[in-house]
């Protein structure tokens, strides 16, 4: 999967940064106020790709006004969607 340096979501430019480490041993995080997704580059590629989809979905939900705050139900939904979307992309040869 080609993870871009920038992606447009709902008319907003979101920067994607590859970093060495994040707080709390996270693999990725989305910061809606700064329009940035940060991913730790020292994980297996498949884990980075799923995490990118996960954080991308958080940003999409945010711009749709869904899942504001730290609702654990929303977190489960986002993670489930990220996993199944990644499986679809892999199973249909859309991820290299």
Image (cartoon, grey):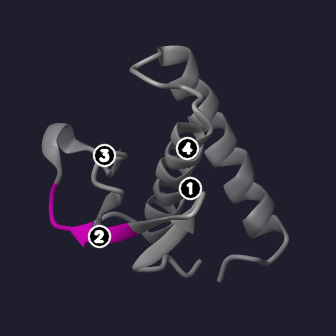
Q: Is 23 within the magenta? A: no
Residue at numbered disc 4: 63
Q: Residue at x 17, y 37 (%)?
A: 24
Of marks 3 and 2, the one in the foreground: 3
Q: Is residue 42 left or right of residue 11?
A: left
Position in image of residue 91 (x %, y %): 81, 66
Residue at numbered disc 2: 17
Q: Nearer the viewer, residue 60 or 65?
A: 65
Position in image of residue 43 (x %, y %): 33, 63
Tell me the element at label 3.
loop
Q: Earlier in the sequence, mark 3 or mark 4?
A: 3
Q: Residue at x 15, y 66 (%)?
A: 20
Position in image of residue 81 (x %, y %): 68, 41
Task: Compute the Cα span from label 4 to label 1.
Answer: 15 Å
Residue at numbered disc 1: 53
Q: Say above or below: 75 vs 32.
A: above
> To which quarter of the image does residue 86 belong?
bottom right
Q: Earlier in the sequence, mark 3 or mark 1?
A: 3
Of marks 3 and 1, the one in the foreground: 3
**Residues in magenta, as a range:** 15-21
> To which quarter of the image does residue 48 belong?
bottom left
């Amino acid at each position: 999967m080609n993870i871009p340096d920038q992606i447009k979501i709902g008319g907003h430019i979101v920067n994607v940064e590859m970093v060495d480490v994040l707080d709390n041993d996270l693999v990725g995080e989305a910061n809606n106020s700064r329009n940035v997704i940060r991913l730790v580059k020292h994980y297996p590629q498949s884990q980075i790709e799923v995490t990118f989809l996960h954080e991308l979905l958080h940003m999409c939900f945010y711009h749709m006004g869904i899942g504001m705050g730290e609702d654990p139900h929303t977190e489960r939904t986002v993670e489930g969607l990220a996993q199944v979307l990644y499986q679809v992309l892999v199973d249909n040869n859309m991820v290299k």
